[in-house]
Image (tube, rainbow, N blue to C red):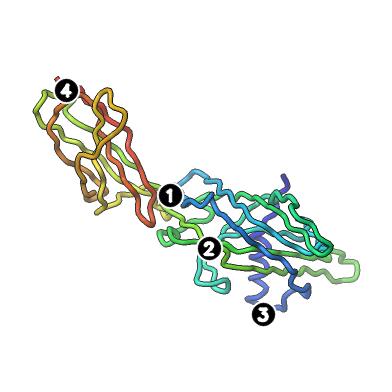
Amino acid sequence: MRKFAIGAAVSGALALSALAVPSASAATPDLTFSKVVVNNGKAIVVGTTSTVKVPITYTLTRPADFVIDYKTSAAGITLYRGASLSKIYNEMEPDDVPNCTATTTTATTVTESCTEVIALAPQDYLYEAADATTWKAAGFYGRTSQDNDASDGHISTEYGFDLWGPLGSVQVKRAAKLTTNATPEPVTKGRTLTVKGALTRANWETSKYSGYQGQPVALQFKAKGANAYKTVKTVTSGTSGALTTTVKASADGSYRYKFAGTSTTGAATATGDYVDVK
């Protein structure tokens, strides 16, 4: 599929605006974006390296005679962080052309059901802890025109863009990781087991995971042959996200730590550590 960098049009237009150059003369198109759903209504949880594909669905209504060619013009949904459309601090947008299907056509308008995907690479869009917050959705239309014929001693490039919003919101969260290690193994029934682990979360400034301190984490146990884990106690993560507690060994089974997540950090569940009780 052909790439169309919406961000390039935005950046170009903002650069021209900063230099007090008049915007392109094209009139604002009569576009309506509605029914915007980002990531199926769920939070976007992002780690340090892997690209997260964020699906977006929306409805676009445009004049019947208005053409968006995705060569010199483009429309879609962009996500932004900022107080308002005029105070955008950070934004992310799709690279690919959206997939739109006409659902209603009249003499004057066409209504389309559209889908697009934002490929969210953390190194490209997320730079600091403050990016773990509520992002807003905006409808976008960008256009550019160029005259590269220098035979008359003149060339020109003009950019223009329109934004509509906010049209919804989505929470962006830092991914978390958990570990669990129960010792000694095997253990005599009635003796003390020490269960250690660590809670860490993505640090977008360093592209590494760092300790998440002061968070309640559930220690869970699933007896051999059981279908589900049950919470034994709650442990608070310490320095560097360290977790440690003790329990009495009562039966064969697996221990694990489970973190419910916060407004800025995704949930995490450690792999169970099986303990043989003699």
Which of disc 1 and disc 2 is earlier in sequence? 2
* Pointers 3 and 2 in contact (C-beta within 8 Å): no
* Pointers 2 and 4 in contact (C-beta within 8 Å): no
Q: Name the residue under label 4.
A: 277
Which of disc 3 and disc 1 is earlier in sequence? 3
Q: Nearer the viewer, residue 105 or 254?
A: 105
Mark 2 vs mark 1, foreground winner is 2
Q: Which residue is drawn at 42% across and 62% down?
A: 130
Q: Quadrant of the N terminus?
A: top right
Provide the secondary structure element on which disc 3 rests.
loop
Q: Distance between the residues labelled 1 and 3?
A: 37 Å
Q: Which residue is drawn at 64% across and 63% down?
A: 139
Q: Mark 3 points at which residue?
A: 20
The amino acid beneath tag 3 is: Ala
Q: Residue at x 67, y 56 (%)?
A: 5
Q: Please state if 130 lies on the left or on the right of 109 as rendered.
A: left
Q: Mark 1 points at which residue?
A: 207
Give the x, y percent position of residue 180. Answer: 27, 36
User: Which of the labelled discs sits on residue 136, or is there none?
Assistant: 2
Q: Residue at x 50, y 68 (%)?
A: 82
Q: Which of 114 and 109 is in front in this view?
A: 109
* Pointers 2 and 1 in contact (C-beta within 8 Å): no
Mark 3 vs mark 2, foreground winner is 2
Q: In which quarter of the image is the C terminus?
A: top left
Q: Distance between the residues labelled 1 and 4?
A: 40 Å
Q: How far apart are marks 3 and 2 (CA)?
A: 27 Å
When the figure is inspected, residue 163 is found, relative to residue 57, above or below; the finding is below
Give the x, y percent position of residue 111. Answer: 73, 58
Provide the secondary structure element on which disc 2 rests.
strand
Give the x, y percent position of residue 119. Answer: 58, 48
